[in-house]
Image (spheres, grey):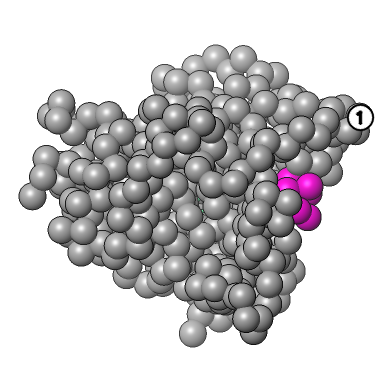
């Protein structure tokens, strides 16, 4: 066993072995397989305030896939779609994979890529612990420098690409070309600024939380950062368990959810039904100024979940009954924008969740501002999950648990 896998015990303290440090530098990018990468990119630019970054396709010499990369701050999303039908003579394994993925999951995240500084070591350790190899480490040198990548099976049909870009200035090797297109006047009108991906949540089937967490411990050297179970997270109808897994430096955080027994089908099971297995449920984007972000996203047409007014009455009660730090943002503005608040005596966080991004009730975004608070909004779980169940009922999916 290599030292990356040594920190296998669940703990909330940082791993101290310096040999463990700095292998993981954060989330690198999220790659989606979608029906049309152009349409998705355009929608995400207009609605969520991303900027065009680069693309590849027929014009850059690609014959099989079209891909558009958009970004904002350190958040990079890549949309990939197939250019040829699965039946065509040129169709390759990559096109088949895109078609099959979309048929099963709808538009979805295929790849949660990690920024690392030792691809070889992480890759070999993962393989020793039973991870499925998808692409051995490859180093490519081009006009942008030198970059090393490798790919590993993660869960279901989702993979992790390991990217060492410490000596690279471009996006990824290949025929990618920068998009020179200026933003339109209306795209410039309500600017939003993102920092980075704060966490990325996975939904899993019954009783998979522990085995999946163990996989991240063994294969990637992650440890448990935090967890909740159905005694803490429940509504009248449903419950869930969640374990947040993180790398030794605690920069990548991935909550792993599983359903728990309740009266009705839970939001996790609704996800599993429509996704067709485990997958990425939400991507949380950290921002510096959530009031401006949400105000401008609303003006752009982003749809958010809506907490009832009683949420704010409860919040004020929670604040009166508990020690809390000074919240700089006026509560009136927070309420007007429909933002959620969680706090402890030392700090607070502000967060808000979008409606599902695509057709199926699967993936959504969270926007989060942290003020000396490293939690996930546990104080909001009950109220939030009740709202999500309301939306679930509107979709005809809040039915008896089978
Ligand atoms: O990441 C989290 O844990 C919070 C809460 O379906 C959450 O954002 C968990 C599950 C879920 C929605 C939000
Ligand atoms: Fe979250």
204 sits to left or right of 283? left
Q: Nearer the viewer, residue 265 or 32?
A: 32
How many residues crowd around disc 1 within 10 Å: few (fewer than 14), some, or many (20 or more)?
few
Q: In the figure, 34 relative to 292: above or below? A: below
- What segment carries the magenta color? 37-44
Across and down, in percent, residue 63 comes to 65, 63
Disc 1 designates what residue? Answer: 185
Q: In the figure, 298 relative to 126: above or below? A: above
Q: Nearer the viewer, residue 4 or 83?
A: 83
Tell me if residue 229 can be seen.
no
Q: Nearer the viewer, residue 289 or 185?
A: 185
Tell me if residue 297 can be seen.
yes
Across and down, in percent, residue 144 comes to 50, 30
350 sits to left or right of 46? left
Across and down, in percent, residue 375 comes to 43, 35
State the residue at coordinates (22%, 54%): 126
State the residue at coordinates (59%, 46%): 175
Quadrant in which residue 57 is drawn: bottom right
């Amino acid at each position: 066993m290599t030292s990356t896998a040594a920190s296998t015990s669940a703990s909330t303290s940082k791993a101290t072995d310096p040999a463990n440090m700095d292998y993981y530098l954060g989330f690198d990018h999220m790659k989606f397989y979608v029906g049309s990468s152009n349409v998705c990119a355009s929608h995400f630019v207009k609605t969520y305030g991303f900027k065009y970054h680069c693309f590849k396709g027929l014009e850059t010499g690609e014959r099989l896939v079209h891909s558009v990369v958009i970004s904002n701050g350190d958040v990079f999303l890549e949309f990939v779609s197939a250019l040829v039908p699965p039946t065509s003579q040129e169709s390759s394994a990559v096109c088949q994979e895109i078609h099959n993925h979309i048929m099963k999951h709808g538009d979805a995240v295929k790849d949660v890529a990690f920024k690392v500084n030792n691809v070889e070591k992480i890759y070999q350790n993962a393989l020793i612990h039973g991870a499925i190899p998808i692409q051995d480490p490859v180093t490519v040198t081009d006009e942008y420098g030198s970059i090393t990548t490798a790919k590993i099976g993660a869960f279901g049909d989702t993979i992790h690409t390991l990217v060492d870009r410490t000596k690279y200035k471009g996006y990824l090797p290949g025929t990618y070309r920068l998009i020179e297109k200026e933003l339109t006047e209306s795209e410039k009108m309500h600017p939003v600024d993102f920092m980075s991906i704060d966490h990325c949540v996975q939904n899993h089937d019954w009783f998979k939380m522990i085995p999946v967490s163990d996989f991240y411990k063994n294969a990637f050297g992650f440890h448990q950062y935090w967890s909740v179970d159905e005694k803490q997270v429940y509504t009248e109808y449903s419950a869930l368990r969640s374990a947040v897994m993180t790398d030794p430096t605690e920069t990548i955080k991935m909550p792993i959810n599983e359903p728990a027994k309740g009266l009705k089908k839970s939001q996790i099971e609704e996800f599993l039904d429509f996704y067709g297995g485990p997958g990425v449920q939400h991507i949380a984007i950290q921002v510096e100024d959530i009031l401006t972000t949400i105000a401008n996203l609303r003006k752009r047409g982003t749809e958010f979940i809506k907490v009832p007014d009683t949420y704010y009455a409860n919040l004020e009660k929670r604040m009166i009954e508990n020690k809390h730090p000074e919240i700089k943002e006026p509560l009136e503005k927070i309420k007007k924008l429909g933002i959620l608040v969680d706090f402890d005596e030392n700090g607070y966080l502000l967060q808000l969740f979008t409606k599902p991004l695509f057709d199926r009730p699967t993936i959504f975004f969270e926007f989060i501002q942290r003020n000396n608070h490293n939690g996930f909004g546990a104080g909001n779980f009950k109220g939030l999950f009740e709202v999500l169940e309301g939306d679930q009922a509107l979709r005809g999916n809040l039915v008896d648990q089978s």
